[in-house]
């Protein structure tokens, strides 16, 4: 059964990989003080899979830094998605890729960061939830 223009494509999340993690903990954080006044920058890039016409990858790069000390984390994750339709350039610029795909991937990143900091023997850094639709709207203004 083929999709027509009125039927949305079915998208599946296939998983993710952390391809970079840089974690620098300040002495204050190591001694039990959680970083406060934290900046969170997110950069995202989507691209079509080079070998499969119906798959795309979303690259999310997060930079987390404390304004008060030198605690910082930089992580780079790739989320893997597939569709029942071929991925087009217009799809890669669509609302799904800008809002929904990051919203699917981000909870895994939040859990990963919490787990890394806990397993380092430190108080967990728990990232806030993110409204990606709101972020996109703010960028437009």
Image (cartoon, rainbow, N blue to C red):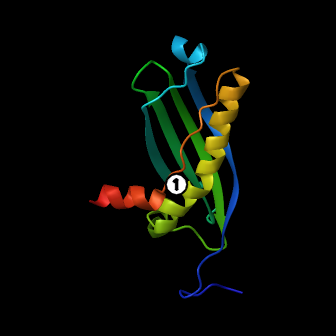
Residue 103: give x, y in percent of width and height.
56, 57
Badge 1: residue crowd in 10 Å (few <14, some 14–19, many ≥20): some
Q: Is residue 26 visible from the viewing direction of this image?
A: no
Q: Which residue is the site of mark 1?
A: 47
Which is nearer the eye, 98 or 48? 98
Residue at 54% in and 50% down:
129
| Quadrant of image for the C terminus | bottom left
Say which quarter of the image contains residue 87: bottom right
Foreground pick, 108 / 43 = 108
Residue appearing at x 36%, y 61% in the figure = 137
Q: Is residue 42 above or below residue 131?
A: above
* Residue drawn at 63 percent across, 35 percent down: 113
The spot of residue 99 in percent (x, y) is: 49, 61
Q: Mark yes or no: residue 94 visible.
A: yes
Locate residue 115 relative to residue 65 in the image: left or right: right
Task: Identify the residue at the far front of this view.
Answer: 33
Looking at the figure, which quarter contains the N terminus? bottom right
Would residue 5 be found to the left or right of residue 108 on screen? left
Q: Is residue 22 above or below residue 104?
A: above
**Residue 51 x/y as whole percent:** 64, 56
Farthest residue, direction left: 141
Q: Residue at x 59, y 13 (%)?
A: 31
């Amino acid at each position: 059964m083929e999709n027509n223009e009125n039927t949305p494509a079915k998208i599946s999340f296939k998983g993710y990989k952390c391809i970079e993690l840089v974690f620098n903990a300040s002495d204050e954080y190591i001694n039990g003080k959680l970083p406060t006044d934290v900046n969170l920058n997110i950069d995202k890039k989507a691209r079509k899979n080079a070998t499969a016409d119906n798959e795309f990858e979303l690259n999310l790069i997060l930079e987390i830094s404390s304004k008060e000390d030198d605690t910082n984390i930089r992580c780079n994750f790739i989320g893997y998605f597939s569709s029942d339709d071929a991925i087009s350039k217009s799809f890669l610029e669509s609302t799904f890729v800008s809002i929904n795909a990051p919203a699917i991937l981000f909870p895994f990143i939040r859990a990963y960061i919490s787990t890394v900091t806990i397993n380092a023997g430190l108080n967990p850094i728990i990232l806030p939830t993110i409204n990606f639709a709101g972020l996109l709207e703010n960028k437009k203004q």
